[in-house]
Image: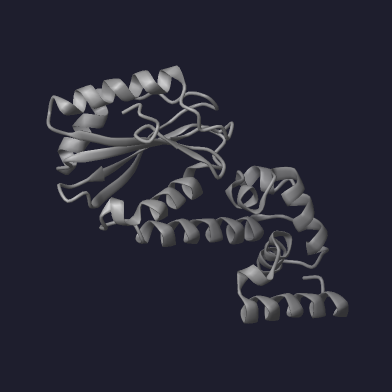
Amino acid sequence: MVANKPHQAGHWQRLRTRFLEGGPDALPDYELLELLLYLGKSRGGDMKKLSKDMIRRFGSFGDVLAADPDRLREFDGVGDVTVAALKSVQSAALRLIRSQVLQRPVLASWSTLLEYCNASMAYSKKEMFRILFLDRKNTLIADEVQQEGTVDHTPVYPREVVRRALELGASAIIMVHNHPSGDPTPSGADVEMTRKVAEAGKALGISLHDHVIVGRGRHASFKSLGLL
């Protein structure tokens, strides 16, 4: 291990102190990432430059955490230890938000549910299709990724969606998928697929409450748009 230079050690100590005393909002994104990199590095280096370079390449703090491990390793000095540190933070954040919506009435935690969907899907480079299964009290009983597709398409089979809802004893579902482009505007194919799922579910007493498309920090609700 390469020994840290005195000024680097002092800098990281100050970052850690500011974080502990002021919380994450006390640090801008690049400094929070810098702190994570320091904690996950197996050797010394210019973490400030690395953090800024990573945010510049990927676009944001969230994009860095969501980046593919192989792309993270493209940076000099970033190995398995650093990748594990970054991905564990992403996983912990998702589990924390997820715990706040599972087994709770969806309408009472709708904003948190949207935060979870955005955090788990908005930064993916491929389309993902997930279903939120609800009981008769609109409590979220299961959250499952059903399909993963390409950068602009995910195959969805209405019969499979309804079959899974029946297996779980769900009375209603909410469909969620992402648009890697960042634009959550529904496409014609999205509208047609939603109509088919709604019809298949209705025939068996399963309601489609909504279909939400997430982009980067944005979302579109079929119900709010009058498409459902």
Image quarter of the N terminus: bottom right
Locate residue 16 relative to residue 103 in the image: left or right: right
Number of numbered discs on residues = 0
Task: Tell me: residue 58, above or below residue 51.
Answer: above
Q: Is residue 5 visible?
A: no
Please provide percent x and percent y for residue 214: 48, 38
Color theme of the render: one colour
Residue farthest toward the left in the current orientation of the protein: 204
Q: Residue at x 26, y 39 (%)?
A: 173
227 or 128, nearer to the observer: 227
Q: Residue at x 21, y 30 (%)?
A: 162
Locate residue 8 relative to residue 67 in the image: left or right: right
Locate residue 72 relative to residue 116 in the image: left or right: right
Q: Is residue 189 visible?
A: yes
Image quarter of the C terminus: top left
Please provide percent x and percent y for residue 194: 33, 25
In the picture, residue 48 is in which quadrant?
A: bottom right
Please provide percent x and percent y for residue 18: 69, 78
Q: Residue at x 33, y 43 (%)?
A: 144
In the picture, residue 192 is in which quadrant?
A: top left
Task: Tell me: residue 215, above or below residue 152.
Answer: below
42 or 168, nearer to the observer: 168
Please provide percent x and percent y for residue 165: 20, 37
